[in-house]
Image (tube, grey):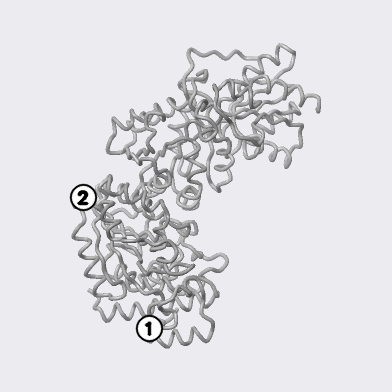
């Protein structure tokens, strides 16, 4: 198992803020919108430096999505930011009609996704957002794993023409991916090569999967670990190629079972390469208030659950 | 300038197109389409700075129009065809398989003149605001127009956009409300009343004009007045009184023809009442 080291823990939302600021400096077509959460999304740097290209929308997310769609007409590239719950479920029809069906080049930037939002509780802890967004025809869905990768993803999606859902989070997590990485939409990253089992993880669960793979190696299990930062389009080739070698797979994500990464992977394997699979995700329930790590443990998506899932799937090989 | 008589002749042809399109598929929305025909005729033939032969999605250095109440697609499609965005004979494909003329408008099928999908109500004002802001950023001094139903104003997003437009001083936007007082289930006042609509828009920080949308001379005069208010720091809305079904007597004065097609006999009666023609498609 490769060693993964990090200098500090940083929040992915700050990676977004830094990426957006960098984009603003080099491309005057970048515009940003926020619905009264500028500080929480770390959009202040952009807002302060480029006030003419920043639109405060107030607590009115439906309007924000429509304005973002309109801004694309004439060549602007809008980044519309708010909490993941308000960036998806609350405005689903606005995204569906004005952005996805209208083929508008809007970047929907969603922070505080999943359980690790923490103390605010279930009203804000959306775990359905990946499913909601991946169902929309033409929508790209990205969930990077740390600060550096979120920054790189933010910069990369500006180059892509079309609607994108970029999901990130609130807590500080190990920042272990390279600072100078080039982010390729739809290209999975093999973090560790192995032979007994494949683990595919997305977002905050990538680091948890590194911890799990390290524990599994101590037990003599060789893990191929893949960071799936892009859930749609899914890197089918990398997953199939890995599974053809390991013949067992575990998926890990901070999302519901229904609609998440695991659901996409299971569908892929069912169609092309039936393989024993275990899904580490939240099972059809809402979250609650608590500390991020307490919540991951209580809802069964922590390091230990990934280890157990691997042990279970190996029994089915 | 096209003279008023010509505009009235065009409007009569557009109304013929509307009833024939809806009749052909026994599907579509004639009532609001007929009510807004005079507005569309005046806007597209006299007011808009646009180039139907060179449609671009970005519409740089052209006026833009957004239809928020997408169900009145028949009148818009007819107007787009009659101004030259595409050939009028394509109107015969309305609501049929593989057509660019979907039941509700969409840019997905590549129909020239359409920049945004609409049908799910309440979204077009936000989009128009965004497009108007981009014009400002691009130093493009052309105007953004939008049209909305009055029933559509029951959607909360409209009022989110209304506040946003005033806050951001979107003064290159002229929105029009088709104030026909009817919606699917009955008179708007019996469903969810809009109350004092003029006072509502004024209190939201908009410049408010009013007109009779079925008198072409008045539509032209009011749109020109609205244009004179561009660039003065406030968004502009026109409350446009119309009669649903205007031009076909049995469709007027009722909400019942909102989304119902005429049968063969009713079509003949309607066409008899719309004598002036440029040539049916």
Left or right of A281 in this view: B177: left
Q: Considering the numbered disc 2 on the image, is that residue within a helix, a strand or a loop? A: loop
Lower sequence index among marks 1 and 2: 2
**In the displayed structure, would residue A190 be above or below residue A6?**
below
Q: Is residue A205 above or below residue B246?
A: above
Question: Which residue was labeled with disc 2?
Answer: B233
| Residue A137 in the image: above or below residue B276 | above
CA gap, disc 1 and disc 2? 42 Å
In the picture of the structure, the residue carrying the numbered disc 1 is B277
Q: Chain of mark 2?
A: B
Q: Position of residue B26 (x, y in %)?
A: 55, 75
Residue sitting at 33 percent across and 55 percent down?
A: B59
Quarter assignment of residue B242: bottom left
| Residue found 60% across the figure and 37% down from its top | A234
For the C terminus of chain B, the quadrant is: bottom left
Looking at the rendered structure, the secondary structure element under dot 1 is loop
Seen in the picture, residue A288 relative to B70 is either above or below; the reply is above
Q: Pinpoint the chain carrying mark 1.
A: B
Q: Specify whether B136 is left or right of A213.
A: left
Q: In the picture, residue B5 is in which quadrant?
A: bottom left
- Across and down, in percent, residue B277 comes to 37, 83
């Amino acid at each position: 198992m490769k060693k993964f080291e990090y200098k500090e823990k940083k929040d992915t939302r700050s990676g977004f803020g830094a990426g957006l600021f960098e984009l603003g400096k080099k491309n005057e077509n970048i515009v940003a919108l926020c619905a009264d959460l500028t500080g929480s999304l770390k959009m202040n740097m952009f807002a302060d430096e480029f006030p003419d290209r920043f639109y405060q929308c107030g607590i009115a997310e439906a309007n924000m999505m429509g304005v973002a769609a309109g801004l694309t007409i004439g060549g602007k590239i809008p980044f519309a930011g708010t909490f993941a719950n308000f960036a998806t479920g609350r405005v689903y029809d606005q995204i569906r009609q004005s952005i996805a069906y209208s083929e508008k080049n809007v970047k929907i930037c969603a922070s505080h996704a999943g359980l690790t939002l923490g103390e605010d509780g279930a009203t804000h802890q959306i775990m359905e957002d990946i499913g909601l967004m991946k169902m929309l025809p033409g929508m790209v869905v990205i969930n990077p794993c740390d600060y550096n990768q979120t920054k790189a993803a933010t910069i990369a999606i500006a180059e892509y023409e079309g609607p994108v859902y970029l999901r990130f989070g609130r807590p500080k997590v190990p920042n272990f991916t390279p600072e100078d990485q080039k982010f390729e939409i739809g290209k999975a990253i093999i973090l560790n090569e192995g032979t007994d089992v494949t683990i595919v993880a997305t977002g905050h669960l990538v680091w948890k999967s590194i911890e799990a793979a390290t524990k599994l190696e101590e037990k003599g299990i060789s893990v191929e670990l893949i960071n799936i930062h892009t859930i749609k389009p899914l890197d089918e080739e990398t997953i199939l190629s890995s599974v053809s070698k390991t013949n067992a797979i575990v998926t890990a994500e901070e999302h519901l079972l229904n609609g998440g990464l695991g659901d996409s992977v299971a569908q892929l394997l069912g169609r092309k390469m039936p393989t024993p699979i275990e899904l580490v995700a939240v099972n059809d329930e809402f979250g609650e208030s608590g500390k991020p790590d307490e919540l991951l443990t209580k809802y069964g998506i922590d390091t230990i659950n990934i280890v157990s899932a691997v042990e279970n799937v190996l029994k089915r090989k | 300038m096209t003279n008023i008589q010509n505009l009235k002749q065009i409007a009569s042809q557009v109304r013929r197109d509307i009833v024939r399109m809806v009749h052909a598929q026994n599907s579509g929305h004639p009532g609001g389409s007929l009510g807004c025909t005079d507005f569309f005729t005046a806007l597209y033939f006299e007011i808009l700075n646009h180039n139907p032969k060179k449609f671009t999605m970005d519409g740089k250095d052209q006026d833009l129009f957004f239809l928020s109440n997408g169900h009145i697609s028949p009148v818009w499609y007819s107007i787009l065809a009659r101004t030259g965005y595409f050939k009028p004979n394509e109107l015969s494909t309305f609501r049929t398989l593989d057509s660019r003329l979907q039941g509700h408008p969409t840019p997905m099928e590549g129909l020239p003149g359409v920049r945004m999908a609409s049908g799910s109500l309440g979204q077009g004002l936000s989009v128009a605001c965004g497009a108007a802001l981009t014009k400002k950023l691009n130093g493009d001094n052309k105007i953004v127009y939008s049209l909305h139903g009055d029933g559509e104003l029951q959607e909360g997003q409209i009022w989110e956009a209304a506040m946003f437009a005033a806050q951001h001083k979107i003064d290159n936007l002229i929105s029009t409300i088709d104030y026909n007082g009817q919606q699917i289930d009955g008179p708007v006042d019996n469903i969810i009343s809009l109350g004092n609509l003029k006072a509502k828009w004024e209190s939201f920080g908009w410049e408010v004009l009013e007109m009779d949308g079925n008198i072409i001379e008045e539509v032209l005069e009011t749109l020109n007045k609205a244009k004179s208010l561009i660039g003065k720091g406030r968004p502009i809305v026109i409350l446009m009184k119309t009669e649903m079904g205007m031009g076909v007597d049995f469709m007027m004065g009722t909400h019942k023809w909102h989304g119902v097609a005429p049968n063969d006999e009713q079509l003949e009666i309607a066409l008899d009442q719309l004598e002036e023609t440029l040539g049916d498609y």
